[in-house]
Amino acid sequence: MPFPGFAKVNFVAKTLVIAEKPSVGRDLASALPGTFDKSEGYLESADYVITWAVGHLLTLWEPEDYDERFKKWRTADLPIVPEEFKLKPRDGKSKKQLNLIHKLMKREDVERIVNACDAGREGELIFKYVLESSGVEKPVERLWINSMTKQAITEGFGQLRPDEQLRPLERAARSRSEADWLVGMNATRAATLKGRAWVGGVVSLGRVQTPTLAMMVAREREIQAFVPAPYWLVHGTFEAPSRAGYAGLWFEGEETRIWNAEGAPGGERADAIAAKVRGKDGRVASVERKEQTERSPLLYDLTSLQREANRLFGFSARRTLQAAQSLYEDKKAITYPRTSSRFLSGDMVSLLKPTAETLLPISEYAPFARYVLELEQLPLGRVVNDARVSDHHAIIPTDVEHDVDTFSPDERRAFDLVAKRFLAVFHPPARYQRTTVVTEVEEETFRTRGKITIEAGWRGVYGVEPDDPSRAEEEDGESGELPKLEEGMTVRCADAQVEAKETKAPPRYTEATLLSAMETAGKRIEDEELREAMKENGLGTPATRAEIIETLIRREYIDRIAKELAPTPKGLQVITMLEAHPLTSPDLTGDWEKRLTDIEHGNGDREAFMRDIEGFTRSTVEQIASLDKEKLRPERAELGLCPRCGAETGEIIRENSRAYGCTSWKSREEAGCGFVIWKRVAGRTLTPEIARQLLEEGRTRDVLSGFRSRAGKPFRARLVLNDGKVEFEFPQRAATGAGASSSGD
Ligand SMILES: [Zn+2]
């Protein structure tokens, strides 16, 4: 120091930085100036002290912490509504770190505190709980960064946000956590007191998990009630004058399927059509060529990334989140992943080309990165939108070198999705030519569709190449080339074949489709832009959805069977118990979510929200308490005498939570005759009606949908009862009722 006499005599003021975890603390230290010394639980330089939480160090009190008597669950005590929510350390380890942080916060040379926890709701809450529990009142600033690169950290410290700016986020975070406590604690106690006997144990309910489960139960009921309807298709094979062949599918109006109708069963009608046209001359009634364009999807937010990774690689939502989080945190390769925005902000435009440049050295991205770099003007219309970026922008690669060889296989796949989408959005739309040919024979019409890719556009990033224009892929009928056809041309129907088919039950949710349904609170919306507008009213937030799915699995409410998610008998029972209760309504939960978003954006009212949640909790508890216990008891079906021992003992078959079993079973020691039909068979739940059919008729009347093999393959089968054992009987391969019209020889 040039003038030592002017140096402060007492101490050098330091800044205390609190990160969310140790690894982040170390990253911050390496980006900040000065040398850091390592101490137990913190790092220190001349200007900074860096310490960290380990996730949540504090948690809300349990009911029994407020009052000993709440240890016992009693309906009369509900709802439990603390006047003021209180905090306690999560466990011994948390307490130790918390004490250390408090000590550092109180140090005299610490003048200000920087909250460097994750730049989102949970991170805000982790820090605010620590601050609240310390009682320290020193100036607080917020490090708010979108990527963990050294440069981003340095810049972030150069423009720390005043804590006031984060108050709305803090209010939303506290509201959400307290609302989940109120609804969860109380509804769970009320439902358990009411239904424990027959659900078996604690009936856990929650503000977001319960409506999510309800959506899945509704779908499961649709599947179980589904009766497949037979229909028939007629495939024609035509010969153009050039002798080249093409296929066509019979249609009438918009319909290609022939249904059973009164008086004229579908199979017979289909056979008649095939017989009528086979070998006859016809003509090309019309040829329509249309050009179609398809734009690149928007950049990823977390939910769309999770959906895509589930669809393509079968990743669970949690697995994708973990890969993305470590790409962000450890590899510094992508920007902040827990985002709900699919756009970038205007101030990022100058970063786009440098970011594309970082993909240039990676061979599979090189040609597309080069294309982007050579653009004079980047098309930003669907990429940049300041109004749709609030706390975070869409997920894109960071503008540093990417050492993809060090990525784990999961990280590599997640990075591939992010990198390709980033390049794709700057590419032109894909262009197709769609051709629809209508062929008419004996007054019957056949449709042939072809599609050629004229220009791959953004799909080129994904390996699609334009087709040779002389070729065409066909959608209907068998694959083959579509010959040159002109309107009015005479063609010959060389053959016509009938195919018998059946309608399919609606599919179970996969994690991809469940995430979509959660995003729109159960409304089926395919349009990407419309979904965008809906997503403040979804179930949960992008950051929490993976955890909600895992919670439902942990509570044994749903099973993950290969890619599918299916409710268990327990899950079905819980929703049956609540039936039309508002807690099962995705709409209502979507509304709560919207109000939380409003609070987060500074235009909602936390007090009003909490009052309403309290009112909702009160009425939920009352409604559950007033459910008639007798009516509530799931109808335990009694299905007549036990086929094994009933004739001698008079024992019957009665439903319990897991099976339809002989009442001679008393306990493991007194297992009785041992006759049992399990409720879960190959991933499907057997209803009492199915059990009844098995017992009375020895087989199910219908071929049942919804089974899954051990390898995860879906299958349909009849169940038969063979010597007291349930076995599968597989349907014959699609033969038409009316003697499948074999082709014309
Ligand atoms: Zn028996």
Image (cartoon, helix red, strand yellow):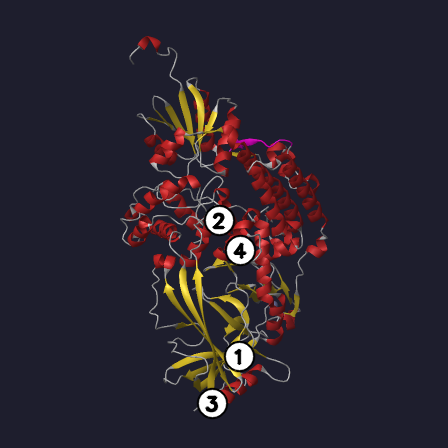
**Mark 1 and 2 residues: CB-CB less than 8 Å, in contact?**
no
Residue at which label 2 appears: 546
Query: Please, what is the three-letter code of the amino acid marked with disc 2?
Result: Ala
Location of the N terminus by quadrant is: top left
Real-space CA distance between mark 3 and mark 4, rounded to the nearest whole angstrom: 56 Å
Residue 558 numbered mark, or none: 4
Circle 1 or circle 2, nearest the eye: 1
What percent of the width, then of the height, locates residue 710?
44, 64
Residue at which label 1 appears: 232
Disc with the residue nearer the chain's start (1 vs 2): 1
Circle 3 or circle 1, nearest the eye: 3
Circle 3 or circle 4, nearest the eye: 3
Location of the C terminus by quadrant is: bottom left
Real-space CA distance between mark 3 and mark 2, rounded to the nearest whole angstrom: 59 Å
Disc with the residue nearer the chain's start (3 vs 1): 1
Real-space CA distance between mark 4 and mark 2, rounded to the nearest whole angstrom: 14 Å
